[in-house]
Image (cartoon, helix red, strand yellow):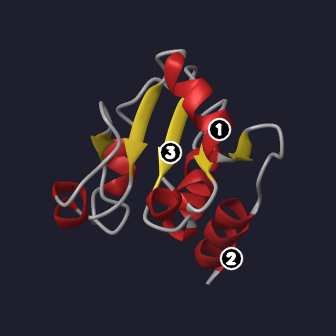
Amino acid sequence: MKKLVIILFIACSQNSNTIQLVNKVSYLKLIDQQFQIIDVRTPFEFSEGHIENAINVNYKGVDFIENISKFDKNKILLIYCRSGNRSGKASKIMDSIGFVKIYDLKGGYMNW
């Protein structure tokens, strides 16, 4: 039970300086700066269409934390999902494991 409480605390805590929700216009400006783009939708969703140069890391996959941990935690990452729900959750996990700056697309790919 103690492990569950600690995990929930880490997953729910968020450094407001680490994660920033941005609109499409701001996201496009960040893409122009050549930051890494992470699409956390399922592989099927990704195959149906995605932002150019995005890398698919399935948030629903059992190996999400292992796969996302392969990225440089000290570099800025852009993240998105379909509507913003999964990317918001993924961002919190990424914050808890040490990523320094994450920009999340407000409204997700539906807003793209």
Residue 63 is at least partly visible in this image:
yes
Residue drawn 61% across the image and 45% down it: 24
As drawn, the label of residue 5 is 2
Classed neighbour count for the residue bearing mark 1: other residues with Cα under 10 Å, few (<14), some (14–19), many (≥20): few
Distance CA(mark 3)–CA(mark 1): 15 Å
Q: Which type of secondary structure does the marked residue at label 3 adopt?
A: strand
Image-quadrant location for residue 17:
top right
- Circle 2: element type: helix
**Image quadrant occupied by the N terminus:** bottom right
Residue 83 appears left or right of 45 = right
What x and y, as percent, mark residue 46?
Answer: 24, 56
Spatial distance from mark 2 to mark 3, Cα to Cα? 27 Å
Dot 1 or dot 2: first in sequence order is: 2
Q: Residue furthest bottom?
A: 1
Tell me residue 107's x, y (percent).
59, 62
Q: Residue at x 53, y 59 (%)?
A: 111
Q: Residue 25, labelled with which disc?
A: 1
Three-letter code for the amino acid on which mark 1 is drawn: Val
Where residue 106 sits: x, y (%)? 64, 56
Q: Would residue 42 appear left or right of 47 to someone viewing this image?
A: right
Type of amino acid at the residue the image marks with label 3: Ile
- The total of numbered circles placed on residues is 3
Q: Identify residue for label 3.
A: 79
**103 vs 73: above or below:** below
Which of labels 2 and 3 is toward the front?
Answer: 3
Mark closest to the chain's N terminus, 2 or 3: 2
